[in-house]
């Protein structure tokens, strides 16, 4: 009876951690990049541009989400979105597999 309750909490903790990571990327590395370059990276440049030096991340390594996947980065005319595909590692999904978006993080 205890195992199902703990399993759900583990996934919830992973989802919460993803939000913390995305906020850190947005408020830290992306803001520093914007200060230096006057704009955020384009969607095409993506987050990869932040790993070209040690300036934005230690050892120039981009953090990955709780399931070991890279974050998806979108820049729509300065409106930034970061996305994790969640536990199922596929676009869309529901429940634990639902995508996690920075814009939906509290």
Image (spheres, rainbow, N blue to C red):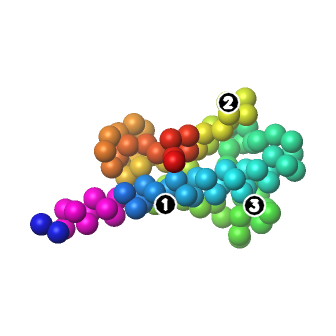
Residue 36 pos. (x, y %): 87, 50
Q: Secondary structure at mark 1?
A: helix
Most extreme residue toward the top is 77
In the displayed structure image, the side of residue 68 where residue 56 appears, left or right: right
> Which residue is label 3 attached to?
56
N-term mark: 3 or 2: 3
Q: Quadrant of residue 28?
A: bottom right
Side of 14 relative to 76 (left or right): left
Instruction: Assess whether residue 80 is covered by the magenta stretch.
Output: no
Q: Residue at x 79, y 54 (%)?
A: 32
Q: Are marks 1 and 3 in contact (CB under 8 Å)?
A: no
Write down the residue under mark 2: 76
In the rendered structure, which segment of residues is drawn in magenta?
3-11
Please state the horizontal and vertical placement of residue 73, each as a whole percent of the image: 61, 42
Q: Residue at x 38, y 43 (%)?
A: 98
Would you name the residue on which mark 1 appears?
17
Q: Earlier in the sequence, mark 2 or mark 1?
A: 1
**Picture quarter containing residue 29?**
bottom right
Crowding near the residue tagged with mark 3, few <14, some 14–19, many ≥20 C-alpha atoms within 10 Å: many
**Mark 1 vs mark 3, CA separation in Å:** 20 Å
């Amino acid at each position: 009876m205890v195992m199902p309750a703990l399993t759900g909490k583990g996934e919830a903790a992973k989802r919460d951690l993803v939000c913390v990571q995305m906020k850190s990327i947005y408020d830290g590395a992306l803001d520093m990049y914007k200060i230096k370059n006057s704009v955020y990276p384009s969607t095409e440049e993506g987050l990869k541009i932040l790993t070209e030096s040690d300036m934005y991340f230690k050892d120039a390594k981009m953090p990955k989400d709780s399931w070991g996947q890279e974050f998806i980065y979108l820049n729509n005319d300065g409106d930034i979105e970061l996305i994790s595909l969640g536990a199922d590692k596929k676009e869309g999904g529901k429940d634990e597999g639902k995508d996690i978006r920075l814009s939906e993080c509290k």
